[in-house]
Amino acid sequence: MTAQIGDLLFYQGERLTMCDAPLGTYFRLGGAYPEFEPSSTALIRGYVATWELLDGRLYLIAIQGWLSDGTDASLESVFRGYPERVFAHWYSGRVRVPRGKLLKYVHAGYASVYERDLLLDFERGVLVASTEKHNGVSDNPNAPEGYGVGALTVFPRPGTQQEADD
Amino acid sequence: MSYLYLYLGIGLLVGIGFSVRGARAYAKAPPITEVAAQALDPDWQPPKRRWLPLILVSSLIWPMLLLLILVDRPLKPAAPMPEFAVTSQHLQEALSVVEMEARERVFDPLGAVPDVPFGHLNTAWQDFLVQCEEGAEFRRFAADWDSGWRRERREGYVEIVQGQPGRFFMTVCKTLPEE
């Protein structure tokens, strides 16, 4: 699988990338799945969720992506009646947030290694521990800073081909 | 000299055998590239196969071909991934529906969750209850599960049918750290 685009996290005034997808757990636990459409090989789950860590609680504040009918996905596509903010009470587990320079690029999943990993542990949506793991220091002055994906193939938006044919 | 004749003789038989096998496999399922080419251009013809050089070359390198067969033997199909099920070892205390729903009330100071049992998962919970038998007994469960490529902690509630755990509703599913 191609390296995957991560969800976004606003934490302590910074905009970071998460190498885990807590919304996937919601679907696994039986939450309604609106059938997202992958827009590229680097976004097989079909959406990018934006999260905010506020007062030690994990909130979902946006969903961007396409649904299989070609329309734009939003928070309300999954959580009707909650267009602005959803408390992620279903999520327990660790979220990895890579930071610093790239040490080793791996073109698969979230496998690339960065100088540091911020590890956030949640219990039912509440932050219970936060640690930083040091993976090394890059000796490459040109190494990219922050999480990124090296290459991807973009898929057409559902319905656009049919419209073009019409 | 007689060994050379023997080698070439066996090679000839192996070569013919391989060619016949190849021709049969081709007739049964032509390569996908040829199928695609034919679909794109109905006039397209597959390149002619020259059997004689193939047989002659096979006669010379037949030990390697036999080795390839051994290496290329279809691997034993992998056992299907086991599906998670709650077992009696996973069972915890018995709880009524009222007790489970009281435990699973979710509060959020910003009001970003509905004030119902299981919060945003309430619809899934209601769907689960509808499938359970009337007056069913429920137990809490907790299990460490090896899904094949990662270990997970799974928790939730399970319906007990004739003393055995049956349908379950999962409330926690988290990846356990690697040992």
Image (spheres, grey):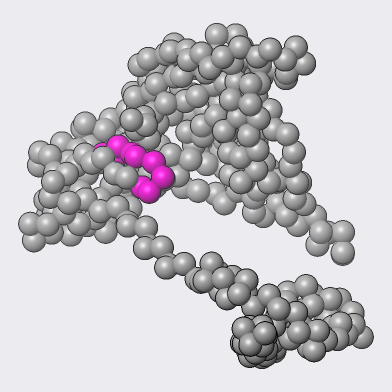
Quarter-of-image position of residue B178: top left
Residue drawn at the location 76% of the way across and 46% of the way down: A154
Q: Is A138 positioned to the left or the right of A94 in the image? A: right
Residue A161 appears in the rendering: yes
Q: Quadrant of the N terminus of chain B?
A: bottom right
Q: Please tell me whether residue A126 is drawn above or below residue B32 in the rendered image.
A: above
Quarter-of-image position of residue B131: bottom left
Residue drawn at the location 76% of the way across and 84% of the way down: B56
Q: Is A83 positioned to the left or the right of B37 in the image? A: left
Q: State the residue lying farthest toward the front.
A: B1
Q: State the residue lying farthest toward the left.
A: B163
Quarter-of-image position of residue B97: top left
Q: How many marks?
A: 0
The image shows residue B163 at horizontal and vertical percentages of 7, 57
Q: Nearer the viewer, residue B38 or B20?
A: B20
The image shows residue B133 at horizontal and vertical percentages of 18, 59
Q: Which residues are magenta?
A: B147-155
Q: State the residue lying farthest toward the right.
A: B43
Residue drawn at the location 39% of the way across and 41% of the way down: B150
The image shows residue A156 at horizontal and vertical percentages of 77, 52
Residue A82 appears in the rendering: no
Q: Nearer the viewer, residue B46 or A50?
A: B46
